Image (spheres, grey):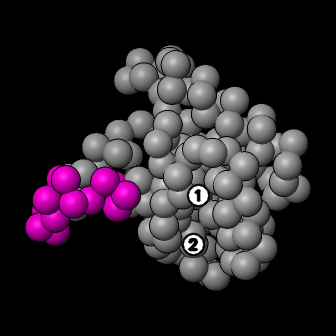
Amino acid sequence: MRILALDHGTVRVGVAISDELKLLALPLEFIPAEPFAACLARLKQLLTEKEVELLVIGLPRNMDGSYGPAAEKVKAFVAALTAEITVPIRLWDERLSSVQAHKMLRQAGHKSKQHKGKVDQTAAAILLQCYLDSIS
């Protein structure tokens, strides 16, 4: 069984998955956020194919720990998912995961215009790795 992580955005949802030992997070793909029905269908497919036991979803917080409009969108997304899937969902603080993803991709030599989708899946992998590190 594996853990799947999502970095929810208004345009794309970054997806990452753990290895079977739940030690490493690997970027997997990104899913267009709209239309929601297509996003949900692909997510359900991944949950089944990858034998996922837990879904970790990044919850953006402001630097002072408060929740802003982006967090409210994530909460609405989670509410919609909860009505459609049976896999348990865990929210995880994702402060600065996208900033870290941009930095990592730049250091790897990727141009910013070339890696829009990679940022989302890399951000999902960063938040999943933080979660995995916290449970080991």
Question: Which residue: 51% across, 26% down?
Answer: 70
* Marks 2,1: beta carbons within 8 A: yes
Q: First in sequence: mark 2 or mark 1?
A: 1
Q: Alpha-carbon distance for marks 2 and 1? A: 8 Å
- The answer to whether 28 is drawn above or below residue 30 in the figure is below
- The answer to whether 4 is drawn above or below residue 72 in the figure is below
Residue carrying label 2:
18
> How many neighbours does mark 1 have within 10 angstroms: few (below 14), some (14-19), or many (20 or more)?
many
Residue carrying label 1:
5
- The answer to whether 57 is drawn above or below residue 104 in the figure is above
The amino acid type, in three-letter code, at marker 1 is Ala
Helix, strand or loop under label 2:
strand
Question: Which residue: 62% across, 81% down?
Answer: 21
Question: Which residue: 48% across, 48% down?
Answer: 12
Give 120 or 68, whichever is nearer the viewer.
Answer: 120
- Say if residue 126 shows up in the picture: no
The amino acid type, in three-letter code, at marker 2 is Ser
Classify residue 54 as left or right of residue 104. right
Snapshot quadrant of residue 106: bottom left
Q: Which segment did they paint magenta?
A: 107-119
| Magenta stretch: includes residue 113 | yes
